[in-house]
Amino acid sequence: MRFGDFDAAFNRQFLAVGATAKLDFGKILVIAGSKGMTGAAVLSAYSALRTGAGLVTLAVPESQRSIAAGFYPEIMT
């Protein structure tokens, strides 16, 4: 099996086909972060997006919300 054949087989089996919505792939709430540790919270939320979650919400302390919101617009804060 060539590398390109593997990619095509993977795409057919694991990627969405047809009309779907982001909520079809699940919702995740990440509750994390403290002063000086906002990056870890954002990386956790971003990892959830990269692994296939449809909707990711990041709950951080109010004082850290503006920092967390500036990293990735796909993550809701």
Image (cartoon, rainbow, N blue to C red):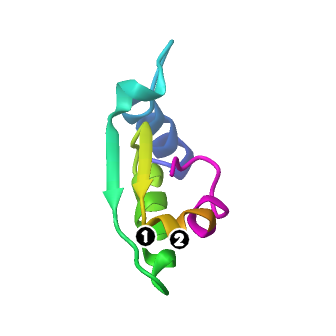
Name the residue type under label 1: Ala
Q: Which of marks 2 and 1 is nearer the N terminus?
A: 1
Q: Position of residue 30 (x, y in %)?
A: 34, 57
- Horizontal placement of 76 versus 55: left or right? right
The residue where tag 2 is placed is 64
| The stretch drawn in magenta includes residue 69 | yes
Q: Where is residue 6 in the image (x, y as percent from the top left)?
A: 45, 44
Does dot 1 land on a helix, a strand or a loop? helix
Q: Magenta part mainly helix, strand or loop?
A: loop
The residue nearer to you, when weighing 71 against 17, is 71
36 vs 48: above or below? below
| The stretch drawn in magenta includes residue 55 | no
The residue nearer to you, when weighing 39 against 6, is 39
Name the residue type under label 2: Gln
Mark 1 Cα within 10 Å, few/some/many (few <14, many 20+)? some
Residue at 37%, 24% in the rendered image: 24
Mark 2 or 1, which is nearer the eye?
2
Q: Which mark is residue 41?
A: 1
Does dot 2 land on a helix, a strand or a loop? helix
The residue nearer to you, when weighing 24 against 35, is 35
Q: Residue 28 carries which label?
A: none
Q: Where is residue 55 in the image (x, y as percent from the top left)?
A: 43, 39
- Segment colored magenta: 67-77
- Tell me, yes or no, whether the two marked residues, 2 and 1, touch with CB atoms within 8 Å: yes
Q: To which quarter of the image does residue 67 belong? A: bottom right
- Horizontal placement of 27 versus 40: left or right? left
Residue at 33%, 49% in the rendered image: 29
Q: Seen from this angle, which residue lies furthest top? A: 19
Q: Position of residue 62 (x, y in %)?
A: 48, 64
